[in-house]
Amino acid sequence: MRVFIISDMEGVAGITKWNQTDGGHQLYLEARELYTEEINAAARGAFAAGATEVVAMDCHGAGGDYSFNSLLPDKLDERMEFVVQREWTEYTGILEDGCDGALFVGMHAMAGALRGVMNHTVSSENWHSLSFNGQPVGEVGINAALCGAFGCPVLLVTGDDAVCDESRALLGGGLTTVAVKQGLGRYSARHKTPAAARRLIEEAARECLKNPAAVPAYDPGKPCEITVELFSSDHAEQFGHRPDVEVVDGRTVISRGDDWLTAWRQFYLSYSW
C-alpha cells in the first residue's frame, strides 16, 4: 500500500503566528520540530495500517531556500521518504505510480474563513480567493485536486477546526479529520498539546487507511475553470499576453482546461511571485 503525506505548517498544534512559519526566525526553528513530528505521527499510523511505501511532500512556502524544505530530515521516521520540490504541486511521482491514499497534515483554512487560524489561500499577500468551477476552495482543495487527478483519494485532514469543517464540506462525510486546535481568531487558538495531537493523528491515520473507499477521489469537474481573484492589478497584468488565461479585470484571472490539472498547470506553474 502506497501512502502520500502532504503537509503544511500553519495547521500544526502549537503554531499560531507568522514568525513560526517564516524561514529564518527563531520561532521557525522550534516550529519545524513540531511540524516534523506530526508528519511522523501520520507515517507511524500508515505503517501500522500496512503501508509498504510512505512519501511525505512538504508544501509550506517558508521563503527562500526554506520553501518546501521545512522538514527536519534527520528527525523523520527512517522508514519513509520525503520530497523537496522547487514549485508547489510540481511533484507527482508517487501519484503516477499508483497511490492508495493521501493524508493531509497541518492544513489551514481558506482565505477569509471565520476563526481559521492563519487562514489564507496560497499567498496571504497576493491572493484573495480561488474557485474551481464556481466552488470556493482553499489549499486543501488544491492538494485534493492534485491527488484526484491521478485517482488518489484524500482520507485524512488534520489542522484547526475550521479547516476540518471546510474539508468535510468539500470531500464528503467519509473523510477523517483531526482538529489539533480550535481557532479563536486568525492569530489565536486553543491547542492540544503536541503529544496529544500526535497520538490522535497516528490513530486516525491507522484507522482511515483501513477503508480507502470511504472517500472518493476529488475531481472538480471536466472541463475545469479555475478563477483566481488577486489582491492587486500588477499580479493580473502578467497574464495579459497568455492565450490560455483570461484576464477578466484588474484582479481576476480565469484559466480553463479540459481537466483540472491542465487548467492549474497553465496558470500556476507560470505564475511569477
Image: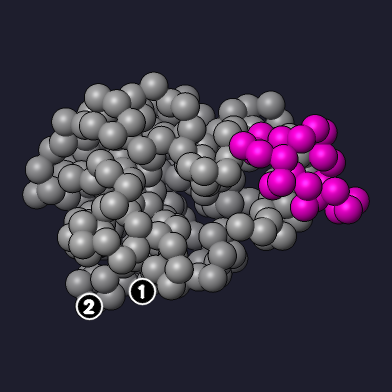
Q: In the picture shown, does residue 197 fall above or below 41?
A: above
Query: Is 74 on the left or on the right of 142, as rendered?
Result: left
Query: Is 208 on the left or on the right of 131, as rendered?
Result: left
Contact, mark 1 vs mark 2 (Cβ under 8 Å): no
Q: Which mark is residue 7?
A: none
Name the quadrant of the N terminus: bottom left
The magenta stretch is 229-251
Crowd band around label 2 with a 10 angstrom C-alpha radius: few (<14), some (14–19), many (20+): few
Colour basis: one colour
- For disc 1, the marked residue is 81
Residue 132 visible in the shown view? no
- N-terminal label among 1 and 2: 2
Q: Residue 25, image x and y in percent?
A: 27, 61
Relative depth, front residue between 98 and 124: 124
Q: Residue at point 13% right, 38% down?
A: 192
Amino acid type, mark 1: Glu
